[in-house]
Amino acid sequence: MKDFTVRPEIEDFAPYVPGMTIEQIQELYGLNSVIKLASNENPLGTSPIVQKVICQNAARAFRYPENHTPRLAATIARSEGVPEECVLVGNGSDEIIDMLFRMKGIPGKSNVIFYENAFAMYRMCAKLAGLEYREVKRDAEYALPLAAMAEAADENTCMVIVTSPDNPTGLAATVDDLATLSGVLPADCLLVVDEAYIDFAWPPESYTPVQAFDQFENIVALRTFSKAYGLAGLRVGYGILPHKLAALVKNARIPFTVNLLAEEAAIAALEDEVFYNETLSLVMRGREYFTDELTKLGCKVWPSQSNFVMFQPPKDPAEIFEELLKKGIIIRPLKSFGLPQCMRVNVGTDTENATFIKTLGEVLNG
């Protein structure tokens, strides 16, 4: 077979490795049922109203969607109180991330700044775009090192990226902290705030800069429908960008990136306040339950503003992970994040949460 030449730095590219699926675990261990608490998905599934809307529009799947998803963009703008021209809908927020790296950075010159023990997507995008990736160290408690990120920026820094609430720690930056960081960055440097989990932060006005978006000139906020809205399988997210930047991205990207069913589902999800509020109630109740019960089991637990908690168990996480898998429970070991001593578990239903805690207790005391 013929070899094809690519840029040398791409040849040893390390791909993103997702967690195992329920079906994979069932086949591997011969299990009839599996509880998955590893991928931060919505514990209630997909809203019944959204499911109905998807079915109602299924026959239209042969049609192309309207380019740039304007109906959903308008709905988001009304919901968030931002100008419609600042909203850019994408095939998951990952599409917006990818476009920002390719449009803001100059290969071989620009750099982007993030911190260690974080989502691998940013490092991957930087490498693909030919940008220098600067990774700032965290302290022993893994606090978000915003001051160190500001110090690491220079005239060639095109983006500083903060995930808030953070994956995998669940920690969040306050609006005041983000405003301070925004104000000290070099000219023409974007502060990109990935808010995939912002729905679970409480109180929300203390954590998201979107409520005061008109006060910032260099902030991009990224959101997703994968978590609180239960649409991970449809891949739809959005960015709130300075309007000139949003227009440039629209002009440069490929057409029809968000499918027709995803748009209809996302519009319906935004209008289903009952399902959204039930999700938040369940997650916040489960988050408190996990924090209390994991602490009782001798685990160190980090305070979370997300739909998951990070914890350090008193035994080897790799062994715990395998024992839980054998019993039909999937959580996330964090070796891939550079945290081999820690694990992450997302909130499930009340029954799933109780089953996990009971099973973990048996594993730890067995």
Image (tube, helix red, strand yellow):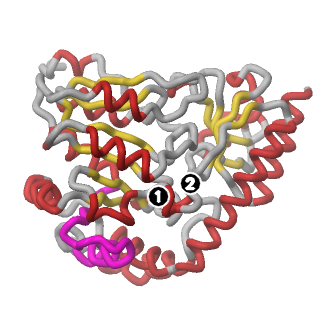
Along the polypeptide, which appears first: circle 1 or circle 2? Answer: 2
Q: Is residue 279 above or below residue 5?
A: below
Question: Taking the image as drawn, is residue 254 in sight?
Answer: no
Q: Quadrant of the N terminus?
A: top left
Q: Is residue 232 above or below residue 84?
A: above
Q: Under tag 2, what secondary structure?
A: loop
In depth, the one of 322 and 105 nearer the eye is 105
Residue placed at 75% from the left, 28% from the top? 313
Identify the residue position indicated by label 2 in the image.
Answer: 41
Image-based side of 253 in relation to 137, left or right = left
Q: Under tag 1, what secondary structure?
A: loop
Identify the residue position indicated by label 1 in the image.
Answer: 226
Question: Taking the image as drawn, is residue 253 in sight?
Answer: yes
Density class for disc 2 (Cα within 10 Å; few <14, some 14-19, many ≥20) is many
Q: Residue 89 lies in magenta, yes or no? A: yes
Q: Amino acid at mark 1?
A: Ser
Are the residues tagged 1 and 2 within 8 Å (C-beta)?
A: yes
Q: How many marks?
A: 2
Tell me residue 161's x, y (percent): 34, 39
Residue placed at 46% from the left, 81% from the top? 271
What distance separates the C-alpha of mark 1 from that of mark 2?
Answer: 7 Å
Tell me residue 287's x, y (percent): 70, 52
Q: Quadrant of the C terminus?
A: top right
Q: Amino acid at mark 2?
A: Glu
- Give the magenta part as a residue range: 70-92
Q: Is residue 283 above or below residue 1?
A: below
Tell me residue 188's x, y (percent): 14, 42
| Residue 293, quarter of the rendered image | top right
Density class for disc 1 (Cα within 10 Å; few <14, some 14-19, many ≥20) is many
Q: Residue 15 lies in magenta, yes or no? A: no
Q: Residue furthest bottom?
A: 56
